Amino acid sequence: MHIKWSFYFLLILLAGCSDQSTILQQIKASGELVVATRWGADTYHSTEYGAAGIEHDLVERFARHLGVKVRYHIADDFMHTIPLTSHNRVDFAAAGLIRSELKGNRVIFSKAYRFDAPKIIGLRGTTRNKDDVFWKNNTVHIVSGSGIHDIFSKLNQDQTFVKTKAHNLGSAEPLVEKLLAKEIDYIAAPGFLVDLMQRYYPQLTVAVPLIEPQPISWAFPKTQDDSLRKEVDWFFTKLQQEGTLASLIDRYQGHINGANYVSNMRFFKHMHKRLPKYKTWFQAASEK
């Protein structure tokens, strides 16, 4: 009888141990990593060769490090990215998120893997005011729920009152289209997107500097088990030390760094005059 009860007690202990496996161990056992992201030039977008974007490529590298596959949950807009994470519907969010005190109440952030300086932009030729005058006389269009939205909320808390209009969008790219169509006057967007768009639309110009570079991080559900976040922090540190992270970012941003109005106009001119001549060659080469 004593042996029988000892056996049952051992089974209970084993069951208890299996229930206490970490989130990281559970992900490895399931073979799947569930990640929230959003459509955007710097996050996740489709190409003829498959999905791409800084966040996409970084997530895929991390998944290979864990030995698992990724299932993406693409949020329709910024507003849904954090709730997906805080409600534990995903393992984490990789969506070009600026680390924010406001969002920090609902999620916990990893270490930063890059920095971005958001900018307020308008069309070249528009009146450029001094900062204090600008804030009083203009409306800045922003994306709801984004880190930039949080920055403006903080500015208003600090008595720097700014008139803004928030839009439920997945990225600031549709706002750039409205700006180019002269439907709105100013928008605030991530520095990476601004630099990229200026490459193709030289008439875009920075109206007022917004804030110093902000940390971009992944967001995790608030839980006592931080095994997954710690693994991500270790992974980012490893990529930084190897130079892999810098190479990955340079893949998407290297061709726009150092560009100015003159170089952008030259690139725009060459794109329209020279590219058509070689377009069929590029298309034929891509099909081989």
Image: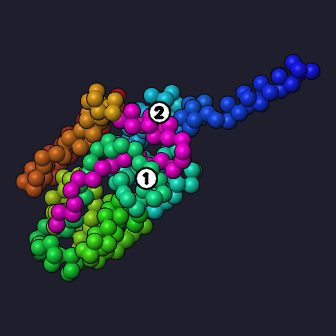
For badge 2, the amino acid type reads: Ala
Colour scheme shown = rainbow
Residue 71, given in percent of the width and then of the height, sits at 53, 41
Location of residue 211 by image quarter: bottom left
Does the magenta portion include 186? no
Tell me the quarter of the image containing the N terminus: top right
- Residue 163 is left or right of residue 95, and the answer is left
Q: Residue furthest top?
A: 3
- Residue named by callout 1: 38
Q: What residue lies at 24% left-to-right and 71% top-to-bottom?
A: 186
Is residue 221 depicted above or below 162 in this figure?
above
Is residue 110 depicted above or below 163 in this figure?
above
Q: Residues within 10 Å of mark 2 (few under 14, many from 20)?
A: some
- Residue named by callout 2: 63
Q: Residue furthest left?
A: 262
Does the magenta portion include 234? yes
- Tell me the CA gap for discs 1 and 2: 18 Å
Is residue 42 depicted above or below 154 in this figure?
above
- Residue 71 is left or right of residue 212, and the answer is right
| Magenta stretch bounds | 208-236
- Mark 1, secondary structure of its residue: strand
Residue 38, given in percent of the width and then of the height, sits at 43, 52
In depth, the one of 192 and 110 nearer the eye is 110
Residue 260 makes an appearance in the image: yes
In this rendering, the label closer to the viewer, 1 or 2: 2
Q: Residue furthest right?
A: 1
